Structure formats: structure tokens, C-alpha cells
Image (cartoon, helix red, strand yellow):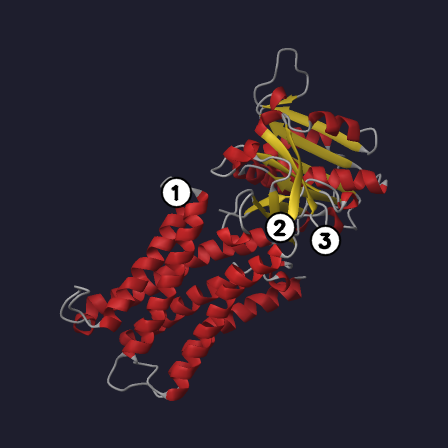
Amino acid sequence: MAFRQAAWIALYLVLVLTPQALLFLGEVPPGRDFWWNFSMALGFAGMAMMGVQFALTARIRPMTSPFGVDIIYLFHRYLAWIALALVAAHFGILWLWYEESLGPTINPFAADWELTAGRAALLLFGLAVVTSEWRKLLRLEYGLWRYLHVVLATLGFGAAVAHIIGIGYFTASPMNRTLWLLATLSWLVLLVWVRLVKPMRQTREPWRVVEVRPGRNDVWTIAIEPDGHAGLRRFLPGQFAWLTLRNSPFGLREHPFTIASAPESLPRLEFGIKELGDFTSRIGEVRPGDPAWIDAPYGVFSIDRQKAAEGIVGIVGGVGITPMLSMLRSLAARGDRRPVWLFYGNKGWEDVAYREELEALRARLDLHLIHILEDPPEGWKGETGFVTREVLERHLPPEPRPHLHCFLCGPTPMTAAAEQALLGMGIPARQIQTEIFELA
């Protein structure tokens, strides 16, 4: 696993650095100093990183499997800021020390087209990053943001390519121009694959909603079954799917949700979805018979990837119970009697989703179920407050604990505190796995 991760990181560096290395190893135009060429290098590096961003969101299984899609998307998010900073620094150096190279005016109707294209690319990339980072603050509906993000990124990329070829500083030679055009073509192929080919393949395997069931804490259970095909052949308990409900798979309305059912229940799939965001606030409007589409399975958050673990610890909050529910259902179906400690944090007792089923699973599993309530009812004798080291110490077996594998899923403050507590208890970091709660 570590080797595969290192190989993909090395490939990323090759993709980012090779274009500019080849350009600079070629014929470098004379008469320019270090800072000028450094500015050019920053621009090429930023552009290459922006291009590879398309690959990071293409959900290429060999690339996502060593890390998990959630980590890849987090990587995509932070690298976008770095790429934007590189492109902005490229422009900033020219503005501060080589202002004459930017032309006599910034008026797009009077400036040279290739210079205007570069400024447009910087603006479009900046808007793509800012509207993604502060989508909720800007009150951008998820579906609208998806469309906007694709349009801004694609137009920005096209403007940047036009700028580079139009300027021609390092791309004047046929070899260098061909190299950059080939790189551009490969990134466009990725875009076509993600936005056209993959949705087209989904249309050949439609699904139908067969059950819609309300639950506590505004968590709805949505069950789907394949419509005229065999469905998924397999998935690992705890993995997730990109789910589209009541819309075309071409419509950029897909959302990532954990598959809450066990693989043993195939071909039926169940999802636990909380009324919370733009789309999920209307989840109660879904009806049996509605069309559904999935792109699945994804994720590394699974007991099946930790078969050597002698004991399992789950620390979850709210709707973060869904991946653990899938794992518990699968353990019960298999008759697996490995001990499980489940710490489940909620606001109040009536907020505990799947409460009755969890109690029933205790009879089929070696399950130690610990509810932790922020606002407990009168007479409550269980744990209160938040997940702390003291709470974990009271319920987990005494040291040594190297045989336990810990799965964390819930709000970031909760998982961060739990991770620090587990590390302080001597559990190695390699045996603590956190599912990122939100991808967008």
C-alpha cells in the first residue's frame, strides 16, 4: 500500500514538473534574467497543477484505492490553492519588476489578446477556488456550484492554454508547442471521460428507489435496487457511492453517500441520508419508483481492509453512524464474533439514529455499545458530554491495545479530539482511520 501511494505521488510530481523541465531544457530565449525565468517556471508549474486537477476528480480507481476518494478530494482542494498561488506569483513578479511585459493597458478591449487570456485565466481560477472554499458562506446551492465549478475550471484552463501558446516565449519551437498541445489534449480527454463517458455508462445500468423510510434525527433510509441488470457485484462494508436521485447522471447532481447496508444484502443498497444540505433537505420528497443512478463503490474505510484486527473500535457522531452500521450488519451476517466497541455521540436520546437496530445487533455480535449524549434526559446513567480520553479509557480494554483498529466518522472537532485521545492512549496512528465527513 505504501509503495502504491509513493508511486502515485511520484507520478504526480512527474506530470507537474516534466512539461516545464522539457521546455527549459530546450532552446531558452536569450536576454532574460533569473527572476523572469523563475516567473515563467511558476506559471508553467501552476498551469500543470491546474491540469492535473482534472485527473484528481476523475475518480480513477487505481489512483483512489491506495488513499481513499476523500483524501484525494482533500488533496485536490489544497493543491488548488497552491496552484493558484503559483499562477498569481507568476503574474505578481511580472507586475512588480517587468511591468512593460504586461502591455500598455489592462483594458481587455485594447490589450493584446494573449495577455488578456492570461489575466482571464487567473481570474477564472481564482473564482473557482474561492467559490469552492466558501460555497456555504456565499450560499451557493450545491448543484449550482457544481455547474459553476466545471464552467470556471474549464474556461480558465482554456484561457491559460491560449495565453501560453499566444505568448510563445517557451513554446515557439514545434517540439515544445506539440508537447503542450498533447498535454492539453490529455486533460481534455479526462474532462470528457468524467462529464460524458462515465454518465453515459451509468444510463445503461439504471436503479429504482424501492423504499423511503424516515428515522430519528431527520435521517432517512433510502433503499434502491437495480432496474433490469444485476447491480453491483461486490463492495466492502463501509464504502460509499456517488448517488443521483430523480435526475439525469449528466446533470451534475450526484452526491457521495455511505452505503449503509451490508454486502450480504446485495443487490439491494441502502443509504442513511440526513436532512441537512441543499439536496438532502428535500430527501423526504423522494418516492418509491423514482429513478436512481450510482457510481460505486469507493473508499478505504472498511473492516475488510483490516482483516488482521482482533478488535474494532468505532467512534462516530450523528449520521456518521452509516459506515459503521454497514460494518456491523456485515459482521452479523458473517457470524463474526470479534469484539466491537462503538462510541456513538449525539445531542439527545431522541437523536440516536438506528437506535433499535443497534440494540438488536448486540444480541448477534460481541458489541459494546456506548452512547454519549450532550443533552441527556432526566435519569440518564450513561456517558455525557463529548468523546474524551477518559470516556475511552473507561470502556476499552486495558493496555496493550495494538490489536485494535479504530474507525472515526463524524464532525471534524469530534474526530480530531478522538484521534488525539487514541494516540495518547498508545494506539499507533496506522491503526486510526478517519473518514472525512464532507467532500464539498
Q: Earlier in the sequence, mark 1 or mark 3?
A: 1
Furthest-left residue in this view: 104
Reading the image, the residue beneath label 2 is 294
| Helix, strand or loop status at disc 3 | loop
What separation in Å lies between label 3 and label 2 (alpha carbons)? 13 Å
Classify 10 Å Cα crowding around label 2: few (below 14), some (14-19), many (20 and above).
many
Q: Residue at x 36, y 50 (%)?
A: 130
Classify 10 Å Cα crowding around label 1: few (below 14), some (14-19), many (20 and above).
some
Residue type at mark 1? Leu
Reading the image, the residue beneath label 1 is 140
Q: Residue at x 51, y 60 (%)?
A: 195
Looking at the rendered image, the quarter that the N terminus falls into is bottom right
| Helix, strand or loop status at disc 1 | loop
Task: Say which of 119 and 429 sits in front.
Answer: 119
Classify 10 Å Cα crowding around label 3: few (below 14), some (14-19), many (20 and above).
few
Residue type at mark 2? Ile
For discs 3 and 2, the disc positioned in front in the rendered view = 3
- x then y, percent, for residue 93: 26, 67
Q: Earlier in the sequence, mark 3 or mark 2?
A: 3
| Helix, strand or loop status at disc 2 | strand
Q: Tell me the tag on residue 229.
A: 3
